[in-house]
Image: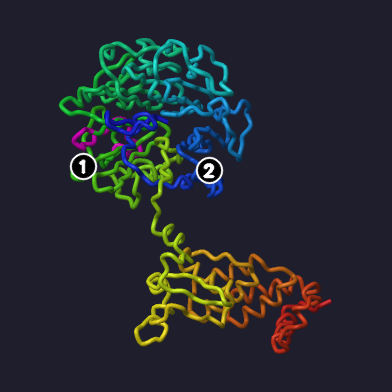
Amino acid sequence: MNAPSSAQNSDSSWGRTGQSEHIMVDVTKWPIFSLMAPEELPSIRKACVFGSSANEAIYITNDDEVFVFGLNCSNCLGTGDSQSTIVPKKLDFLSGRKVVSLSYGSGPHVLLATDDGELFAWGHNGYSQLGNGTTNQGVAPVVVSANLINKKVTEVACGSHHSMALTDSGEVYAWGYNNCGQVGSGSTANQPTPRRVSSCLQNKLAISIVCGQTSSLALVDNGEVYGWGYNGNGQLGLGNNGNQLSPCRLVGLQGVCVQQIVSGYAHSLALTDEGLLFAWGANTYGQLGTGNKSNQLSPLQILTEKERVVEVAACHSTHTSAAKTQSGHVYMWGQCRGQSIVLPHLTHFSCTDDVFACFATPSVMWRPLSMEHDDFLTVAQALKKEFDNPETADLKFCVDGKYIYVHKAVLKIRCEHFRSMFQSHWNEDMKEVIEIDQFSYAVYRAFLQFLYTDNVELSPEDAIGLLDLATSYCENRLKRLCQHIIKRGITVENAFSLLSAAVRYDAEDLEEFCFKFCVNHLTEVTQTTAFWQIDGNLLKDFICRASRCGAFKN
């Protein structure tokens, strides 16, 4: 994945990632992270999903431990073997090293830079993209040091099979596959070790680098952009479609000061310091956002009638583009879940990362995520935290001699029963303690907790009592949740009791489910205590109904 880029004042937590604002991103929007337990997620400080099917992931914990899991194509997990793993494995070799930049290729191969300037690489190496002078697969992280001695690497970027590194002195190094000149060496010979990209970059101070599949771009400190490599679709923005073996300046961006560049599979985007957005290159899927599917050989301004753009997003694995405006609107275009969207489409997302999680193919991350685990709580999290908190509560229920602390306003907002109860003409509106005697403590607490969390945690037997409450209070969603819990917990021993409860509380779907279970396990059910303790009329009805179903045929 190309490391996204921005101007000098950006957050440096992943190199120049364009991530200067704090964003709240749910990492489980990427399916591979949904494998992790919720209690494990807060330990993640940085994360990246990559691979041809978004089936590999790497993450760094708050303690600077590096973990990987997934398919392990071409040893891209760096675990020392070729085995896939659904359980995260720690890369001990990288323990304690503070990661500042991370990128991946299509093989895939992985590059990682640490805050002390060291560069590590592993994975696919068929074209020497690991920079170690060989074409042997990298089964575990190795230090890339050739030609980088006494150099401090601050940012890395990967194309499909070539690699780039940026140093703190503004030098650009490239190596690996070079069939189209993407290494910028002036030839098309593969480059086995890091080589400084010079030519017209010789006396320039580069501040950011990105890669398309087989092309390369660099942004220098005065806002100029230089490109080299494959240009068959115009992705270098030079006004032609000829490959370039050495860096060439994008004269089409003359007169503007670029602060962020990104590259897709074969298209590029540039954002200026005035919030103007330019696009060029391949447009087969509408990824340039021009309203058509014609390739563009020179930078063309897009989103001209929208407000100021503050961030753009693309990565070399996809044909998807995204942008965020000053007011927080997020647009997407290009290949989105198989559709070709030729004009920027306004989404309901709050960040560009979500576009790639939900609509890119594959659903990789366009940049590694820096996870924010501060004291901020969402409204839902805050409500959950305050349930049964005597310090903030203004009302308490007394059930079976035990108190449950709640907030009157929350109850009125969440439940029609309480909205009616706390009218001025009801006695309860003036009380600080309300006695409840028709339901058990476990059931009533579960009900009140549901109003704060939308979740129910009860045994199937207790869920029967909650089903009674939900029926009494006309809480239909709660009623459905109770039925779901009861269905999941049905056994031969409790089946007839649950059937009786379903009949009593007019839960037709649950009644049918319990009835079928009893019929399917008729011999065992009829030998339980619950079966013979049941109401006579219900027992008769069950026998008649089971008979009609042929349950007693020889």
Classed neighbour count for the residue bearing mark 2: other residues with Cα under 10 Å, few (<14), some (14–19), many (≥20):
some
- Please tell me in which quadrant of the rendered image residue 149 appears: top left
| Circle 1: element type | loop
Task: List the residue tagged with mark 1.
Answer: 308
Q: Residue furthest front?
A: 391
Task: List the residue tagged with mark 2.
Answer: 32
- Picture coordinates of residue 302 (x, y %)? 23, 39
Task: Report if residue 337 is visible in the image.
Answer: no
Give the residues in magenta. Answer: 272-288
Task: Report if residue 506 is visible in the image.
Answer: yes
Q: Give the residue displayed 46% in from the left and 59% down from the top.
A: 385
Classed neighbour count for the residue bearing mark 1: other residues with Cα under 10 Å, few (<14), some (14–19), many (≥20):
some
For the residue pair 299 and 379, the one nearer the viewer reads as 379
Magenta stretch contains residue 529: no
Q: CA distance from mark 2 to mark 1?
A: 34 Å
- Picture coordinates of residue 54 (x, y %)? 50, 38
For the residue pair 44 and 172, the one nearer the viewer reads as 44
Q: Residue furthest bottom?
A: 537
Q: Give the residue displayed 36% in from the left and 82% down from the top.
A: 423
| Circle 2: element type | helix
Looking at the picture, does residue 249 appear above or below residue 398?
above
Residue type for callout 1 = Arg
Q: Give the residue displayed 43% in from the left and 57% down from the top.
A: 381
- Which image quarter holds the N terminus? top left
For the residue pair 459 and 268, the one nearer the viewer reads as 459
Magenta stretch contains residue 280: yes
Q: Magenta stretch mostly in which secondary structure?
A: loop
| Direction from residue 72 to residue 412 in the image, left or right | left
Q: Residue furthest left?
A: 255
- Which image quarter holds the C terminus? bottom right
Residue type for callout 2 = Ile
